[in-house]
Amino acid sequence: MFETIRINGLRIAPALFLAPMAGVTNSAFRRLLADFGGYGALFTEMLSASAFLHENPSESPFTRRRDCEGPVFYQFRISSGEDVGALFQKLPMVDSCAVDLNLGCPAPRIQAQASGCALYRDFGQLATVLGRIRAHYSGTLTVKVRLGDDPQHWREPFIQRLRLFEDCGVHAVTVHPRFSTEKLKRRARWEEFPWIAAQTRLPVIGNGDVCCPEDVETHRSCFAPLAGLMLGRIAAVKPWIFRDFAGLPRLEIDHQEVWNRLYRYTLEDMPPERAFGRLKEFTFYFAKNFFFGHEMFKLIQKARNPEEIRDAANRFLEAGPRLNASKGVPFS
Ligand SMILES: Cc1cc2nc3c(=O)[nH]c(=O)nc-3n(C[C@H](O)[C@H](O)[C@H](O)COP(=O)(O)O)c2cc1C
């Protein structure tokens, strides 16, 4: 499963994607993932169209891309008020293999700006935004969605939107099968993947709560109709995880070395005040490798700058902490 996927003629192999994650999938983190490999393509974190217009794309840790990363999908949140023309005029300055439109973010701040879930909800605005994108951009376009708002009546609106995506020349859809009200609570509804994939001719990439290849193998009937698989939080816990899904040889992992490499990469790509929050966010996930990982996270909470985070993390890692043996990861 997931050997290869074609999106608008672009062959991506394996059909394994890093999920866009704000605060995590910046250029430094993607560089770390590239060191391990095993994925087919990476997503940037969600980029605001208006912020993008003010960034220097080759320097910003949000938009910078290194050759070692391979194909990178640039995810944008766009609402109807934004200058879509200017965005796509500037886009060639980054080396994106595709543009992804975020239609799934439930964060109130994002919804208040009529993007993410709010844009998915408003069919008229969604059609307008997709039409405006298509008026300025003929390249590869994908969207990332949840199931919608209403657990009782989501299917019909979902099909309506799939038709719209097909009509607007969207090339693939990533589905994170939770409702907009659920944030990351409850389990992702993998059992909906076959129904979803049967409703559209577009390739469907499935996402949500997948932690190890066994998740896919033991729920084969859920995952088999999908064209691709996207991993999010587990890649922050185990940046080498794509190798397991791709069937590449297992590596001996030195957790302390990996953490310090990410630290180095982060400080190479961004100023300390920006790196600070990113290092904390990454460590929140990375700490889940350890039986007493909450202790690691607690230690770095007291840090006031990146150096103090590094010192606290190394104090924990040098003690040879016991690894968490379970394959499933409690993310909350
Ligand atoms: C810290 C964090 C940031 C996220 N930021 C984004 C984002 O920028 N764009 C997006 O489409 N989804 C975002 N998501 C959702 C993920 O892409 C993914 O759909 C979700 O985490 C479920 O997948 P997982 O269980 O493999 O992590 C974010 C999730 C997390 C945990």
Image (tube, rainbow, N blue to C red):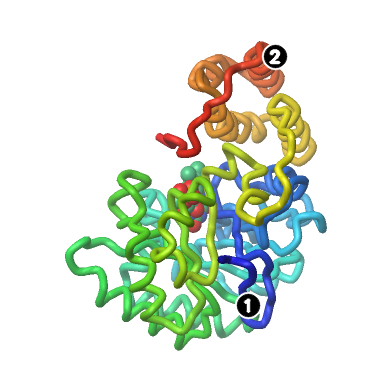
| Few, some or many residues within 10 Å of mark 2 (<14, 14–19, 20+) | few
Look at the numbered disc 1 and give the secondary structure of its residue.
Answer: strand
Q: At which x and y percent is residue 270?
A: 73, 38
The image quadrant where one finds the N terminus is: bottom right
The residue singled out by tag 2 in the image is 318
Q: At which x and y percent is residue 207?
A: 47, 58
Q: Quadrant of residue 332?
A: top left
In this rendering, does residue 280 appear at all?
yes
Seen as rendered, the residue at the extreme left is 152
Seen as rendered, the residue at the extreme bottom is 167
The residue singled out by tag 1 in the image is 6
Q: Amino acid at mark 1?
A: Arg
Q: Amino acid at mark 2?
A: Glu
- Residue at figure coordinates x 69%, y 29% from the top left: 259
Instruction: Indicate whether 122 appears above or below 307.
Output: below
Per the model, the C-alpha gap separating discs 2 and 1 is 44 Å
Q: Is residue 92 left or right of residue 170?
A: right
Given contact means CB atoms under 8 Å apart, are the residues at marks 2 and 1 in contact? no
| Few, some or many residues within 10 Å of mark 1 (<14, 14–19, 20+) | some
- Residue at figure coordinates x 38%, y 84% from the top left: 163
Instruction: Indicate whether 20 appears above or below 150.
Output: above
Q: At which x and y percent is residue 129?
A: 46, 76
Q: Which mark is residue 227?
A: none
Q: Quadrant of residue 146?
A: bottom left
Look at the numbered disc 2 and give the secondary structure of its residue.
Answer: helix
- Residue at figure coordinates x 53%, y 71% from the top left: 227
Instruction: Indicate whether 263 appears above or below 250.
Output: above
Q: Is mark 2 within 8 Å of ligand 1?
A: no
Mark 2 or mark 1: which comes first in sequence?
A: 1
